[in-house]
Image (spheres, coloured by chain):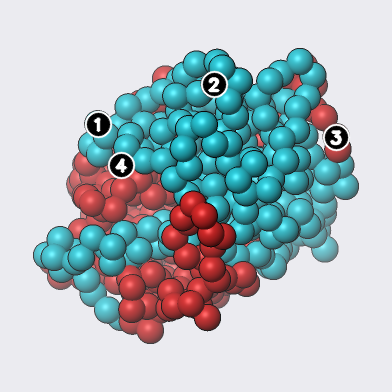
Chain colours: A cyan, B red
């Protein structure tokens, strides 16, 4: 195995180190965050840092960088306190990736990439119509991460929209059947093949394989 | 599409809501965190919340819950300030899942699950021998998330061990070739198939597909 030490890490060219370090954490989720500012201008941005934080209350987190193209997302969320998260599937992963281009504030990434806005109830915050699993959140907290000047944005899920067939009897959503993609590194997109679901781990026995419905197969 | 509102969310049975909410963020990384306490007792625990936080410095985060079986991990990290993160691959995902059983503190999950300890240099913190991409971290910060009493643990990567063939010319690591797995929901494990790498997004053109080496294919 190759052993890279801290001296070699610090001497790497920035782009090489960014590719390498971005590969370390494993597969990342692929999500589009939809927002609108107080003037009604919509925005859509790709994030690979959306993660589960808790089920009760239902909390989802993501990381923002201060000086990046995704700054409009955070500004809009601070203004309206609401946003949508939309899982990216194989059908539109190129358009999703394209939202990370440096469009001007007055350009909506929806128009520029061919994705469609979708609205529910009386809310003016845009979902991505093409997404097969998406949800609305209310901002709950912004936690500064002083070490590298990033921020952890935490929202509470209030409404979920999902293809009904994908929701299994125990609440598990078969996101593989939705063709949801994952990301590795900075720019690699993947679809998945299920190995199995596994039973709750207990001392004294090894896990049992379960089918997608959570039943012993 | 099925629309689940906040009233329906709060009325769900806990286990159903946990399955559902854990599916929302998309695919999660699968990693084993290796630690040792000041008495030399090793510990190994499965995490699906490891994520990339920054490349320069190389920072990786993960979320801990206070009253779970993973409490030994955090206690050990506080004592020794070091830990390893080990990507889980198809070969040993059952053993990796099994580390989440509630073993006693005096039992090492290595012994109980059949995974092997591996050490480098003079460090006494254990890697997982079977893992094909793993790294050593030094604790840099523990950020409390007061909303739900969890904590964000942040470490800086100091040493990386990786199958040399998987490291491409631009620093990208082909974790698909390592058979690294991803997780959906609480307990579903997946391998991947690459759709493509995509070129850096620029206004005025759509992304171009690249091969695994980051070259236009």
Report which residue position mark 2 lands on: A37
Report which residue position mark 1 lands on: A146
- Up/down of B51 relative to A211, above or below: above
B99 displayed left or right of A143? right
B15 displayed left or right of A23? right
Q: Which residue is drawn at 86% across and 38% down?
A: B1
* Residue contact at pointers 1 and 2, CB within 8 angstroms: no
Label number found at residue B71: none
Residue A128 vs residue A48, the one in the foreground: A128
Give the CA separation, mark 4 to mark 1.
11 Å
Q: Which residue is drawn at 52% across and 31% down?
A: A106
Binning the other alpha carbons within 10 Å of mark 4 as few (below 14), some (14 to 19) or many (20 upward) gives many
* Residue contact at pointers 4 and 1, CB within 8 angstroms: no
Q: Quadrant of residue B183?
A: bottom right
User: What SS does tag 1 mark?
Assistant: loop
Label number found at residue B2: 3
Question: Closer to the camera: disc 4 or disc 2?
Answer: 2
B191 displayed left or right of B146? right
Question: Closer to the camera: disc 3 or disc 2?
Answer: 2
- Up/down of A121 relative to B143, above or below: above
Report which residue position mark 4 lands on: B154
A134 displayed left or right of A25? right
Screen quadrant of the N terminus of chain A: bottom left
* Residue contact at pointers 3 and 4, CB within 8 angstroms: no
Give the CA separation, mark 3 to mark 1.
40 Å
Residue A171 in sight from this viewpoint: no
């Amino acid at each position: 195995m190759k052993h890279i030490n801290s001296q070699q890490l610090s001497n790497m060219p920035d782009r090489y180190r960014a590719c390498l370090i971005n590969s370390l954490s494993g597969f990342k989720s692929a999500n589009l965050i939809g927002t609108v500012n107080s003037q009604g201008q919509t925005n859509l941005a790709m994030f690979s840092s959306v993660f589960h934080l808790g089920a009760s209350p239902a909390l989802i987190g993501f990381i923002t960088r201060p000086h990046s193209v995704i700054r409009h997302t955070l500004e809009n969320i601070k203004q309206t306190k609401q946003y949508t998260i939309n899982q990216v599937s194989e059908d539109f992963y190129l358009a999703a990736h394209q939202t990370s281009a440096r469009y001007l504030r007055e350009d909506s990434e929806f128009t520029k990439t061919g994705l469609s806005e979708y609205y529910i109830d009386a809310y003016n915050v845009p979902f991505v119509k093409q997404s097969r699993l998406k949800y609305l959140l209310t901002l709950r907290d912004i936690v500064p991460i002083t070490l590298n000047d990033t921020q952890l944005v935490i929202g509470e899920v209030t409404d979920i929209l999902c293809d009904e067939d994908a929701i299994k009897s125990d609440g598990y959503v078969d996101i593989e059947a939705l063709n949801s993609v994952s990301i590795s590194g900075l720019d690699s997109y993947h679809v998945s093949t299920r190995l199995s679901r596994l039973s709750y781990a207990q001392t004294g026995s090894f896990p049992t394989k379960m089918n997608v419905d959570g039943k012993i197969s």
